[in-house]
Image (cartoon, rainbow, N blue to C red):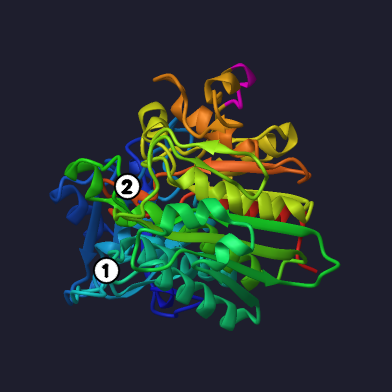
Amino acid sequence: MTDLLITSSPTAIPVHLCNTGDWDSVKARLPRALQAFAEASGFSGQNGRHLVMPDRSGNIAAVLLGVEASDARHRDPFGPGRLSGVLPAGDYAFKGKLADPAAVALAWLLNPYRFTRYREQPLPKARLVCPRGVDHAEVVRMADAVAASRDLVNTPANDLGPDGIEAAIRALAADHGAHVEVTLGDDLLTRGFPMIHAVGRASVRAPRLIDLTWGKPDHPRVTLVGKGVAFDTGGLNIKPDSAMLLMKKDMGGAAAAIAAARMVMGAKLPVRLRLLVPAVENAIAGNAFRPGDVLASRKGLSVEIGNTDAEGRLILADALALADEDEPAFIADFATLTGAARVALGPDLPPFYTHDDRLAADLARLAPKVNDPVWRLPLWGPYDNLLESRIASLNHISSGAFAGSITAALFLNRFVSRAASYVHFDIFAWNPTAKPGRPDGGEVQAARLIYACLKERYPAP
């Protein structure tokens, strides 16, 4: 859909933004025939309403869009971009001052996304002239990355297993001249990834660790880690059917990490990028790992299994331990990890965890700027004792019913000790309902935010 953002058009149809407070002044600048048409249509700048206005020949003369006032407390920067999904084919250009022109241009491309692998769907054809001052290539780069990863999340597990995740990363590497190494099946045991192996060994599709590297070796080391559970039955602690229905999205963390990596490489940021994706299917068979098992880990910690439906943190732990061995400047992991995060903050606002106060401040500042919302929750040290085990170094789930997202983050934190900075995102990777720029279905959360953070820290020359 990135062809819907163009650099110029001499015949672009004007789109006038207004609200109920400034409608009279906007109306006064319109031709009298259009003023009369707007009045007859009952339009007065109502938020969310648009009006397509014809000329005397029946062609589109202009479009009106009611938006929130620029000082509205909960103004959605993506709001005007929703027009890309409803306007007829043609070229359009916003007139007047946009509160956030880059967000509007991005939303114009993100809003009409459709997952068309199994069913043809009519695609929007309204093209927008890129607003003045907006980096066209940058917006297209981000939209391409998000769309490709939305496709991954939306693809069901019969067509996207661990092998399919590997194929997607190999294709990404081919596009950008990156190197990929894969540790597959029983080789995970000999090469020191026992928890990835344990979680994925019951599936007919072998578990694997996918390791992509890109960039000059002497550049700052940045590692992105994504949870790649292609499908999660819950294992022997099997999920009820209602909870299993969306589990094709349990690789949403991998999709987010892939999207962020695609943006970083596309922008040619001066970093030594590493993308680590442990890819498994948490299936049920005679060799499935069990509640009460004690697993070895790459870090050397023994881990007692409290519940096989908390598998994501196990595979991430081995991957994070590997990432940490390089002593990178930056590690970020993305994972559809806990229902507790959704209870606390809902589907649209992922929590993040870090001990790095400077990084936390940067993320809090950048999140609204790029309209990729997150909220910091604490790595609350006193809860660490909830992970105690009587027979192993630690249990991988809490012994209590509370603070599930925090204790999951505390578990992961045990496997990172050398990186200069580390952040964990507990994402949902799904839009239950459509919003401007965010159609229902698979979603990519926190990737644009991390890209913005890295771009600020390591600007392209």
Q: Which residue is mark 2?
A: 235
Q: Secondary structure at mark 2?
A: loop
Label 1 Cα neighbours within 10 Å, binned few <14 / some 14-19 / many ≥20: few
Within the magenta stretch, is there residue 380? yes
State the residue at coordinates (39%, 79%): 11
From the viewer's perspective, is residue 54 above or below residue 322?
below
For the N terminus, the quadrant is bottom left
- What stretch of residues is rendered in magenta? 378-382
Residue 440 screen position, x and y as percent: 28, 53
Between disc 1 and disc 2, whose residue precedes? 1
Q: Which residue is mark 1?
A: 158
State the residue at coordinates (52%, 38%): 374
Tell me: 50 left or right of 270: left
Inspect the image, locate mark 1, and give the three-letter code of the amino acid beneath it: Asn
- SS majority, magenta: loop
Residue 125 screen position, x and y as percent: 29, 75
Can residue 359 be seen here? The reply is yes
